[in-house]
Amino acid sequence: RKEVEQDPGPFNVPEGATVAFNCTYSNSASQSFFWYRQDCRKEPKLLMSVYSSGNEDGRFTAQLNRASQYISLLIRDSKLSDSATYLCVVTSTGTASKLTFGTGTRLQVTL
Amino acid sequence: NAGVTQTPKFRILKIGQSMTLQCTQDMNHNYMYWYRQDPGMGLKLIYYSVGAGITDKGEVPNGYNVSRSTTEDFPLRLELAAPSQTSVYFCASRGQGTHEQFFGPGTRLTVL
């Protein structure tokens, strides 16, 4: 089983739609959780951290369910500029804070 | 503040050749990482460093070597390049007390 699993998509949605991505992780000792965004042929960039209580940043909402080892990202009112690959990322224990990446979910927002 | 810079951007190698991928950061970060990303795959950790003079293997270290003589630089060395090393290589760094990693723009390497 992969450490971090995501549906690769692509998710094709019209502008203004709401879309949700899910991610599961296998290591129950994972400590921190993130969503990174990666544009085509570019480097990953941090989109947002994910907290147990759930957190929101504008049109983006992230949720964590530790009991089910499940992370989600909700995007409301999708924009063309949201088209990208969204990477689910978890950290291992230890001081090096190594990140484990999912393979990513591709989102294409269309007119 | 340039952040994390990587050179070269692109490179084509022949089987058996060697090269060094350069990575420099100007944020005074202690932690630095090298990843590779194959098409349709997640990033895999090759090597990492928690400070100058300290390096350790990641998930996929075979065929690579690193050094960390300064805080700023973390070069990745490929000896005896193989087609399986065709990939996009990303360097990243992070500061103390945060999990956020900052990535360089990547080096696209093809081994023929």
Image (tube, coloured by chain):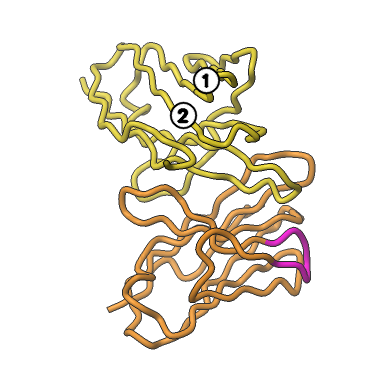
Residue nearest the observer in this picture, B83 or A65: A65
Label 2 Cα crowd, 10 Å radius (few <14 / some 14-19 / many 20+): many
Q: Is residue A59 above or below residue B41?
A: above
Q: Quadrant of residue B18?
A: bottom left
Cα distance in 3D space between marks 2 and 1: 8 Å
Depth-wise, is mark 2 or mark 1 nearer the camera? 1
Residue B79 is inside the magenta segment: no
Q: Residue furthest bottom?
A: B16
- For disc 1, the marked residue is A68
Q: Which residues are magenta?
A: B49-55
Is there CB contact under 8 Å for labels 2 and 1? yes
SS of the residue at dot 1? loop
> Residue B43 location, x and y as percent?
46, 51
Q: Amino acid at mark 2?
A: Thr
> Residue B26 sits in which quadrant?
bottom right
Q: Chain of mark 2?
A: A
Crowd around label 1: few <14 · some 14–19 · many ≥20 (10 Å) = few
Q: Which residue is mark 2?
A: A24
The chain assigned the colour yellow in the figure is A
User: Which quadrant would residue A87 be assigned to in this image?
Assistant: top left
Residue B109 position (above or below residue B18):
above
**SS class, disc 2:** strand
On the image, the x and y values in percent for residue B50 come to: 74, 58
Q: Is residue B83 left or right of residue B53?
A: left
Outermost residue, front direction? A1
Q: Residue at image x 54%, y 77%? A: B77
- Chain coloured orange: B
Majority secondary structure of magenta residues: strand
